[in-house]
Image: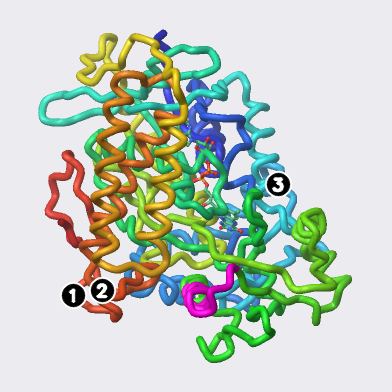
């Protein structure tokens, strides 16, 4: 079936929803579709605990937030992008409040928390369920705009629809598949917003929900758009260690409030690892824990809050307290067993902070994008901030584009979709290959890398990619196949990125090149076929 909209939005996390609300307000006559592959709230946004960083107190300053961000980014942040995001921060927080988000307040003022790498308290939060509150409010606000916004749940985007016009390539929407309804649709729109989130599911241990399979990067790259900085994957240092169960994140704010990392026999881990000790940035903490676990052979370390005021802990972290208790750990009484897990991708689809990509009509926002905001390492609570600022700026930029461009009646589509609906009889091939890919990424492309292990990973990924590509062409019709195909494409791009950075910087640590090298003070860019510029980056 064919559907026509003015704006097609892929993803219902903070980036997609905020973008939809801004676009709807700016274009009251426009019709928007939000397509999401599961339920509206199956997003990373919904799981965010800590909060959003913004300069909102008299003792803080824009310059201080910029400096903290640049310091974490280890030389690779784009200063102009950081300035834009940090300066726009306070106004987007007010906009979120306007859309109904209820942040925690004390005496009418925002209660500002502190997290690792921040020089002061600047994290706006809704207790320790900030993402859930944002998602609730934005979904509700979008539903109130039902005259303009249609939701398509359980609809997975397979690929973008593109067509040539003179020497330009233009995005005209996306091919979408619903496994439940067993239908393929072509969604046509002059503006497509890709807000598909991250890629944590490429790893065995991750804090990310099941939807985070890197689809956006793979989809954009197949359409010719370059990918940037994919070697920089942030591992969250403290996920609750409960083997066989869904990993539960213990927010960095817990260390911000005085939590201390210890070995099983009680030795403080961060004591001599960094001057900021337990408040050091995530990469340093995760690598220190990784080293500790490799040396000791233990499976976890401990995060201790038993010395802190128990009423304060229960009040400040009600969700963490209850969830740990539900899993058998009373954190007031005993230390919490934790391990590092894949958490956030600093790299993604190459774009400007206004969401513009190399493909005309295609915009991106949120974790899927690589704008230069995070450089080689993201500062805690800066990702929700970047997502919402970017969604706002992209709504302005794409509205300008929308007002000047439309789609022809008949679109000369070059790429087409398989019309046949085949179903694989055996799903075991998919689950086996997915697990194998996660193992390869965790074992060979994890916190500490070597060239040999990366080359081995590339070989194994190519094999999985070949199998799945054959399988996809023959039987495209399950989400499992679609996601595994995207995961294999992204894994390849990630390893290629890691292999060309012959230095260690931020989140990329490679034993063969353990030091930073200023010859690599550039973004890593895996050029897509639309890349015309001679980008100032490291390219293969
Ligand atoms: C446990 C956890 C805690 C976090 N805590 C914080 C924090 O405190 N502060 C902070 O700043 N950041 C935090 N982050 C990071 C932050 O939450 C994410 O970076 C941010 O929410 C990403 O938003 P997004 O809109 O880009 O993507 P998401 O919220 O992940 O939404 C992606 C959407 O795209 C859809 N989608 C994906 N692929 C397809 C496809 N092929 N077809 C159709 N739909 C598709 C998904 O279904 C989903 O609706 C945390 C992340 C996690 C996992």
In the picture, which quadrant includes the N terminus? top left
Was residue 110 drawn as part of the magenta stretch in this picture? no
Q: Distance between the residues labelled 3 and 1?
A: 44 Å
Task: Determine whether 399 is above or below 462 in the image.
Answer: above
Which quadrant would residue 377 be assigned to in this image? bottom left
What residue appears at the point 54 percent right and 59 percent down from the top-left corner? Answer: 89
Tell me which label, 2 or 3, sits earlier in the chain: 3
Q: How crowded is mark 1: few (under 14 residues within 10 Å), some or many (20 or more)?
A: few
Q: In this view, does 293 lie above or below 425?
A: below
Any part of residue 65 in sight: no
**Helix or strand or loop: what does disc 1 sit on?**
helix
- Element carrying mark 2: loop
User: Mark 3 and mark 2 in contact (Cβ < 8 Å)?
Assistant: no
Horizontal arrangement in the rendering, residue 342 relative to residue 132 (left or right): left
> Of the residues under marks 3 and 1, which one precedes in the sequence?
3
Q: Name the residue under label 1.
A: 519
Q: Is disc 3 surrounded by few (<14), some (14 to 19) or many (20+) residues within 10 Å?
A: many
The correct choice, above or below, for 99 with respect to 167 in the image is below
Distance of mark 2 from mark 3, alpha carbons? 40 Å
Callout 2 touching callout 1 (CB < 8 Å): yes
Q: Residue visible at 62% across and 73% down?
A: 301
Please tell me which residue lies in front, 498 or 30: 498
Mark 2 to mark 1: distance in Å?
A: 9 Å
Quadrant occupied by the C terminus: bottom left
- Give the mark toward the camera: 2 or 1: 2
In magenta, the rendered stretch is 287-299
Specify whether tag 1 is near ligand 1 (CB below 8 Å): no
Residue 503: image tag: 2
Question: What is the number of the mark on residue 133?
Answer: 3
Residue sitting farthest toward the right: 311
Q: Position of residue 208 (x, y in %)?
A: 55, 49
């Amino acid at each position: 079936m064919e559907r026509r909209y003015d704006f097609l939005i892929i993803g219902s996390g903070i980036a997609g929803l905020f973008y939809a609300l801004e676009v709807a307000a700016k274009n009251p006559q426009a019709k928007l579709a939000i397509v999401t592959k599961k339920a509206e709230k199956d997003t990373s946004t919904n799981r965010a605990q800590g909060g959003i960083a913004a300069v909102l107190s008299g003792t803080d300053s824009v310059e201080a937030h910029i400096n903290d961000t640049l310091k974490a980014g280890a030389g690779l942040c784009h200063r102009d992008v950081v300035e834009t995001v940090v300066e726009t921060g306070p106004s987007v927080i007010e906009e979120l409040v306007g859309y109904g988000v209820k942040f925690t307040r004390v005496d009418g003022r925002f209660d500002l928390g502190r997290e690792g790498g921040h020089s002061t308290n600047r994290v706006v939060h809704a207790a320790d369920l900030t993402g859930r509150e944002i998602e609730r409010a934005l979904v509700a606000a979008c539903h109130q705009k039902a005259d303009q916004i249609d939701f398509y749940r359980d609809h997975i985007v397979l690929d973008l629809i593109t067509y040539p016009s003179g020497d330009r390539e233009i995005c005209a929407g996306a091919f979408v598949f619903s496994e439940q309804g067993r239908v393929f649709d072509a969604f046509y729109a002059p503006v497509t917003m890709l807000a598909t989130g991250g890629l944590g599911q490429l790893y065995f241990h991750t804090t990310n929900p099941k939807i985070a399979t890197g689809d956006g990067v793979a989809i954009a790259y197949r359409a010719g758009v370059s990918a940037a900085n994919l070697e920089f994957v942030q591992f969250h240092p403290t996920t609750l260690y409960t083997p066989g169960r869904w990993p539960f994140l213990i927010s960095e704010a817990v260390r911000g409030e005085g939590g201390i990392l210890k070995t099983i026999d009680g030795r403080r881990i961060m004591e001599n690892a960094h001057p900021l000790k337990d408040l050091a940035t995530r990469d340093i903490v995760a690598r220190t824990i990784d080293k500790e676990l490799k040396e000791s052979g233990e499976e976890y370390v401990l995060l201790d809050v038993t010395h802190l005021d128990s009423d304060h802990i229960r009040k400040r972290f009600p969700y963490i307290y209850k969830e740990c208790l539900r899993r058998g750990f009373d954190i007031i009484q005993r230390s919490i067993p934790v391990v590092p897990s894949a958490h956030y991708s600093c790299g993604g689809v190459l774009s400007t902070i206004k969401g513009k990509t190399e493909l005309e009509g295609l915009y991106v926002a949120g974790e899927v994008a690589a704008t230069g905001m995070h450089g080689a390492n993201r500062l805690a609570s800066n990702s929700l901030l970047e997502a919402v600022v970017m969604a706002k700026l992209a709504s302005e930029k794409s509205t300008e584009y929308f007002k000047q461009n439309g789609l022809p009646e008949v679109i000369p589509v070059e790429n087409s979709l398989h019309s046949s609906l085949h179903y694989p009889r055996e799903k075991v091939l998919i689950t086996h290959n997915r697990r194998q890919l996660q193992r390869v990424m965790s074992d060979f492309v994890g916190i500490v890398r070597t060239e040999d292990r990366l080359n081995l990973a590339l070989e194994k990924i190519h094999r999985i990619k070949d199998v799945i590509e054959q399988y996809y062409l023959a039987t495209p019709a399950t989400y499992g196949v679609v996601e595994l195909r995207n995961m294999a494409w992204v894994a390849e791009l990630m390893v290629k990125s890691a292999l060309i950075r012959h230095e260690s910087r931020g989140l990329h640590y490679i034993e063969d090149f353990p030091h930073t090298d200023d010859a690599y003070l550039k973004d890593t860019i895996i050029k897509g076929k639309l890349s015309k510029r001679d980008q100032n980056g490291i390219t293969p």
